[in-house]
Amino acid sequence: MNFFEHQDRARQNTQQLIGLFSLSIAVMIMAIYIASLFLFRMAPRVWWHPGLFICVAGMTIIAIAVGSLYKIACLREGGSVIAQELGGRLLLPEFADEQGQQLLNIVEEMAIASGISVPEVYLLERETSINAFAAGFTPNDAVIGVTRGTLQHLSRDELQGVIGHEFSHILNGDMRLNLRLVGLLHGILFIYITGELLWRIRGTSREDKGLPLWAFGLALMAIGGIGLLCGRLIKAAVSRQREFLADASAVQFTRNPNGLNGVFQKLQQMDSRLISPGAEAASHMFFGNALNPSFWDNMFSTHPPLAERIRRVGGLNVSNLAAMPSRNQIRYPSQESLTMGFSGGSSATPGHVVSQVGSVTPEHFAHAQALLSQLPESLRLGVREQESAMAIAFALALDTENIEIQERQIAWLREVQPAELVDKTLELSGEISQLDPKIRLPLVDLAVPVLRQNSAKECQRLCKCVHGLVVATGSLSLWHFVLQLILWHRLQPSINPTSATTVEFTSIEQIWPDCLLVLSVIARVGHSQPDASTEDIAYAFRSGVFRLPKAAEQEKPDTPPSCNFTELKKGIERLRLASPKLKQVIVDACAHTVLLDNKVTQSEADLLRAIAMTLDCPIPPFLNPQRGISKQKQSSPKGS
């Protein structure tokens, strides 16, 4: 099952969740109705009273809806809300100790290898147990929470296994489902809270008048308790199989089953429970069981038994893993093309691209570590400091080939930014210009966590400044378009934290013109060399178009449509609203257009990855061993 199938399965699980939740509400309505019959002293004479049943059903549904909608509204800002409710604090590089720095390094490596935005990391300082979680709505706004005990008791390999497990939840669409589960089940908790309030006012009324009220409160508490048990059953039904999948994915990511097994062995001797009162609501999100064990553990636990997890991880096909080269043995053949990036063989296919979206391979993990090791110390530290991170974003927008244009850009920047920041931009620009071009996108992602600490207004101003630097060049290059597209997308959780991407398009007819625009630009970028002909561009374009479903039934232009970057951006934004199945065929068509000639230039690689990332389809970097890859002039598509 690939990334897109996991996303679609997560949507189906959401429908299953709503069905189970509705069943729980029905059970609670019947229980409250029976309690109401005794409250009004109708039972045992009368067991069916339509008016009372309608009243009870209506009030119960309203109460649960109010509780759920309130919690869902609180969670609109994403996983950071959950992390803060659990007592987590944002782990900032400048304040992180040695253990925290190691955690941040592992998260960065995993994020670069998988092609997602580097998640914010929260440290649950008061929790001495071994546990972790991932929360968010999309890979672009994910956060990872880790307990202090995890850092204290695990080795690097073991910690890497835990983080790989959490990245699986990020990449497989589990987080959005988990957040919805927290919101929905809060409504059931609201019934328990209401009963507790009624029980507490038992002393304010006298004798027979007070007795039924506090008794009804106790009944609501009992019913709310039943609801909580139903909630645990729902969480167990939804999350157990996802935990097995995440364990298997962590082994696949790290090629090291011993790391994850080491964690399980330590959990057998130690503890994964949390002391935070918010652990109940978020128990299904954690790596291990966050709640106290109970007699009903096998039925209500959100996690499979440790013994079963150990057995399954031990039973994975380790022979296949052993056959894979270790990180020190990985050798990438020397070639101009980047087509080695996904297959690990002599050539890549669109199928390889699609299958590796939303995944991490040991080769890509090693590749990410190699990329990060190439960064000069000034840039490695710069991405973790506010002013330097901003300077890096500006430096990436500077023209390094035309001094006159760069001077014009710097002159404009001095008008809107402090002199110290401009000087820092110039200093870092010199170092960035010496880097392999394939490091530019990872460098953007490394700077994003610090940039997101700015306010929404400051993030918008940063994007406008980058746009101003691009305008100052007098022409928009492909790299400038990619930089602005990725930077704007990555900063959306800070610019508009309550926005949510919903599926609006489920058929290719609804987004056909947008698909044509994107494929047209990709075909032009892939054949922008002087010796390329219009026939080559048209052939690449048609090859991509016919990968789309129902292509024979749709209207197709004789020549690839021309567009500018503004129109392209609007088209990509519409494609973001497509269903996972449609996104799969879009990425497949884009990859087919790029790989048609068995060559992938750096421009094509950047554009393909930028489009996929903006569609929330994290795509690993293309692997290329050449450190001194020739820089190609980034050209805009013809007709733009």
Image (tube, rainbow, N blue to C red):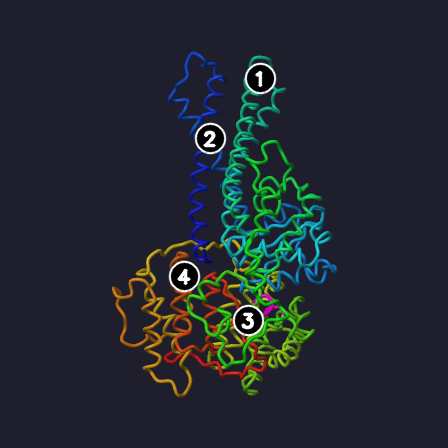
The residue nearer to you, when weighing 217 against 223, is 223
The amino acid beneath tag 3 is Leu
Q: Position of residue 129 (x, y in %)?
A: 70, 46
Quadrant in the rendering for residue 277 = top right
Residue of label 1? 210
Q: Earlier in the sequence, mark 4 or mark 2?
A: 2
Q: Earlier in the sequence, mark 1 or mark 4?
A: 1
Magenta part, dominant SS: helix
Query: Are there few (<14), some (14-19), or many (20+) residues within 10 Å of tag 2?
Result: many
Q: Earlier in the sequence, mark 1 or mark 3?
A: 1
Residue of label 2? 60
Q: Position of residue 16 (x, y in %)?
A: 43, 42
Query: Where does the magenta region start and end?
Result: 364-369
Residue of label 4? 584
Above/below status of 92 relative to 78 = below
The residue nearer to you, when weighing 596 against 283, is 596
The amino acid beneath tag 1 is Gly
Image point 49% across, 69% down: which residue?
342
Query: Are there few (<14), some (14-19), or many (20+) residues within 10 Å of tag 1?
Result: some
Residue of label 3? 441
The amino acid beneath tag 2 is Thr
Quadrant in the rendering for residue 469 = bottom right
Depth check, mark 3 against mark 2: the one in front is 3
SS class, disc 1 = helix
Image point 59% across, 67% down: which residue?
325
